[in-house]
Image (cartoon, rainbow, N blue to C red):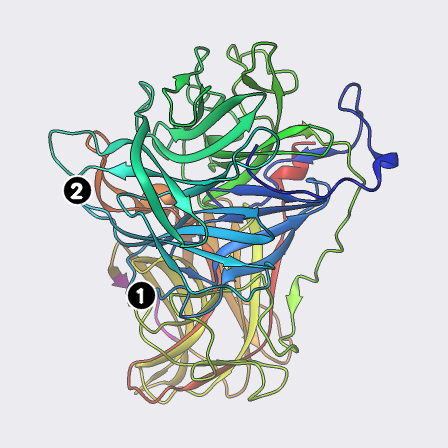
Amino acid sequence: MTAVPTAPDQNQSHRRKSEGHQGPVIVNPVLPGFHPDPSILRVGDDYYIATSTFEWLPGVALHHSRDMVNWESLGGILREQRLIDLTGRPDSGGVWAPCLSHTDGLFHLVYSDVTNLSGAFKDVRNHVITAPSLDGPWSDPAPFPSHGFDPSLFHDDGPGGDGRSWALWMEWDHRPDRHPFAGILLQEWDRQERRVTGPLHRIFTGTTLAHTEGPHLYRRDGWYYLMTAEGGTGWSHAVTVARSLELTGPYEADPEGPLLTSAGHARAPLQKAGHGSLVSTPDDEWYLAHLMARPLSPLGPCVLGRETAIQRVEWTADGWPRLGGEPSADDKSGSLPRTIVSGPALQPATITPKSPRDHFDQSDLDVRWATLRRHPDPSWLTLTERPGHLRLRGGQSLGSTHGQSLVARRQQARDFDFTARLDAEPESPLQMAGIVHYYNSSLWHYLHLTWDERLGRVLRVGLCAHGEYFEPVPAVVVPVGAVDLRLTVRGAQGNFAWRTGQGSGWQPIGPDLDVTRLSDESATVGDPATGHFTAWGFTGAFAGLCAQDLTGASMPADFAWSEYQATSDLRLEAR
């Protein structure tokens, strides 16, 4: 197991061994919506999952649980400019594949900052930061080996370990005559000096699935286990395991093939299963956190992006991990992810759900919100300048990767309604504010209040499809005062509507919207055969509030409230 020093369990009375356990169930995904590349960690009786955030802030989303069934968002870890600066990062660049670990009373967070990912090259800066608490204070970033991405740390603590730490990462090879995924590298990490030391080891070059990345290292019963992601991030994604009696290898891959994959099962509800990490309970129950996706149709568009699920893991007599529970009739290998999973023998820890409506009556943004490439700052975002409102000052266009005034939350259900009350007085066609269904800088649907020289204050629907902007219907004149805006999404179709702030009936505006355009598949452009792409789709869709002022006057746009209401939950339907 990863080096997570845990205090002796002081309350064993409520725990039972896994044999015959009939406790609560885990319903997957446990983190719906855009939450990929999970790194799961236990410290004492607390469980944490850290996930990638790419160009969204705060960087590295963090969730907490005490029973692995119910998970609560703690927001993000990288909340300061000194920890991450995403200005100008490309779509689906930024913060990739974090690894959260704990040793010597400190949390260690390793993460990639990807500044370029198109074509043959990956320009990456890897960093590590430490803190005594997940609330900080976090140290300044120390440089981590940056031959590639997906860095992680393994602390060889516990019985039989020597207490040293080790850095792992995948190496990227841009040369045309080489496979770009060149294998997993290992080097000792000096925790005091915060740098690598000693010889560099290439410990694994992968299986025939190739695209070997996402390494995590564990120790159990005298064996070192290397868990990797393979098969690419699409439909052939997988979790593979190799092991060695020596830390530096050689590592032998599991002869039975992947521990987890949904490849070859087009109608399985959890697709793209891969990129996993392990955790064990105090009673030695093992679980695997991994990414997956739920397409709108078999092998169709994944608007919600890549999500996080948890699987139970059992160990064979000869020491290989296997998915727990009964496989489905068509799952001959037993590696297909389960939607319903037996939970661990832990005391239930329910979480009070938050109201779907945010009245913006706190001094800080709720943890459900994210900002795009820039940290919240009073120069463009404030909750106190007009009490009871979120004030956004107009920034750059939705096509920009600099200075956007956009606050959004993940789409977490196939069907949902997103509404907001907006008060703004644009005086130029270059001033806009409204609600947006956003994937990236070239894919979005935008209902916005603006100004027309002939008509005055109007609502317009603006659509952007791979950078091509168009407005499908004429502008609609709206009266002075606050207006309510609504986005309704039902699977592959979306619709906008509006009403006056005095509660009049909803009036539709614009055509039916093709939501599939806002998907990982639509955003990804390139050649799967070579692994070289000009654009990537890694983030899933967001519903957001935004304001633009291309005159440079920073027009204020005030939102009195916003509500995200899921009208269906595929997780609950799976029960």
- Whether the magenta-drawn stretch holds residue 116 is answered as no
Who comes first in sequence, dot 2 or dot 1?
A: 2
Q: Quadrant of residue 84?
A: bottom left
Q: Is residue 520 above or below residue 328?
A: below
**Pointer 1 residue:** 471
What residue sits 59% from the left and 75% below the top?
Answer: 364
Regarding residue 33, the answer to whether it shows in the image is: no
- Mark 1 is surrounded, within 10 Å at the Cα level, by few (under 14), some (14 to 19) or many (20 or more) other residues, namely some
Q: Residue at x 27, y 37 (%)?
A: 171
Q: Is residue 472 magenta?
A: yes
**Vertical arrangement, residue 40 with respect to residue 340, above or below:** below
Left or right: 126 as drawn, with respect to 270: left
Q: Position of residue 485 (x, y in %)?
A: 53, 70
Q: Residue at x 59, y 39 (%)?
A: 29
> From the image, which quarter does the C terminus lie in?
top right
Residue 329 image point, x, y percent: 58, 11
Q: Quadrant of the N terminus?
A: top right
Quadrant of residue 87 within the rendered picture:
bottom left
Q: Which residue is mark 2?
A: 120
Q: Relative to the observer, which residue lies in front, 173 or 275?
A: 173
Give the magenta-colored segment's residue range: 469-475
Relative to 551, residue 156 above or below:
above
Callout 1, which amino acid? Glu
The total of numbered circles placed on residues is 2
Q: Residue at x 45, y 50 (%)?
A: 191
SS of the residue at dot 2? loop
Tell me, yes or no, if residue 458 can be seen here: yes
